[in-house]
Amino acid sequence: MKFLPQTTLLEIEEGSLLQPKFDERGLIPCITQDHATREALMMGWMNAEALALTIETGLAHYYSRSRKKLWKKGEQSGLYQHVVQLLIDDDQDAVLLRVKIDGGASCHVGYRSCFFRALAQHGPETDFTLTFLETEKAFDPHAVYTTDQQGNPLPPKA
Amino acid sequence: MKFLPQTTLLEIEEGSLLQPKFDERGLIPCITQDHATREALMMGWMNAEALALTIETGLAHYYSRSRKKLWKKGEQSGLYQHVVQLLIDDDQDAVLLRVKIDGGASCHVGYRSCFFRALAQHGPETDFTLTFLETEKAFDPHAVYTTDQQGNPLPPKA
């Protein structure tokens, strides 16, 4: 699968053809959200191969910057992401996936979403404390993974 | 406002303190979604100054890579983004903003969301045609902007 090159600003921003822009590292950022709830699950990166495989197979593929390799989401955990819709933003330099996830969870730490913590207090007086928005893990990462995302042994249970 | 340095993997992934990771360019990606509908509105970038101003003021600030400058969302259009919640992901290298937007629109092309197009057909046979998910612009960009995001005159109306 070969992607179309970017053409004019008008075509890119208002046209009807996918012309994805990969950055100087050959990557495009990808936001993945739950199709039903629109909850943001994770943010990852794709190279051209990962984007092509995502489109061809309907299963989300990413590029791991730390492991420097293609990464089929769920290949270790079984928590595959089935693509319902693939969106592109105005200047076509960011992808949005709407997915259904096997097992109902996405985050390798064990939570449903990777965004499971929020800043407790805004304003200049913040002490940077985070509040947990998910109080229970959706799965036990130690039962699913044997290594972390870098291939190292998992840290001890929190 | 000075951010805390990243410490151990366990603290970063399961701890209760914001320890944002900026990349080699000094940037962290930011996904912005509508607080009420969870619709993904845009994906942008923040440097430390933009993240600090966002936290301090409660208004979304970004860093424009093309213009190489801080960018207070809405400064030209009036479509400010009021932060309801600021989330961080597991490895603290991506920010998620939940916002209320003045004017109900976010995209400089005129649509509610920057993600207003989706791939019409998945699978190896795709011809890369995009379907418009929003059929009417929420505002006329020519009435709001005089230049594009790079400071150039707007392209002619589509």
Image: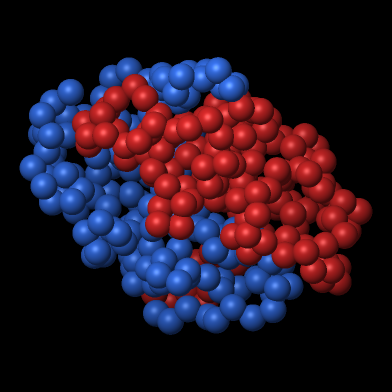
Chain colours: A blue, B red
Q: Nearer the viewer, residue A65 or A39?
A: A65
Residue drawn at point x = 37 percent, y = 20 percent: A132
Q: Position of residue A99 (x, y in %)?
A: 41, 47
Q: Nearer the viewer, residue A20 or B15?
A: B15
* Farthest right residue in view: B143
Q: Position of residue B149 (x, y in %)?
A: 73, 60
Q: Nearer the viewer, residue A136 or B126?
A: A136
* Farthest front residue in view: B2
Residue A25 located left or right of residue B60: left
Residue A136 located left or right of residue A46: left
Q: Position of residue B94 (x, y in %)?
A: 43, 43
Residue drawn at point x = 76 percent, y = 43 percent: B74
Quadrant location of residue A128?
top left
Residue drawn at point x = 29 percent, y = 25 percent: B15
Query: Which quarter of the rendering shows the C terminus of chain B?
Result: bottom right
Quadrant location of residue A60?
bottom left
Residue drawn at point x = 55 percent, y = 50 percent: B45
Q: Is residue B150 above or below residue B1?
A: below
Q: Is residue B73 above or below residue A104?
A: below
Q: Is residue A139 above or below residue A74?
A: above
Residue B70 located left or right of residue A155: right
Q: Position of residue A156 (x, y in %)?
A: 10, 29
Q: Is residue B34 visible?
A: no
Q: Is residue B66 visible?
A: yes
Count of picture labels: 0
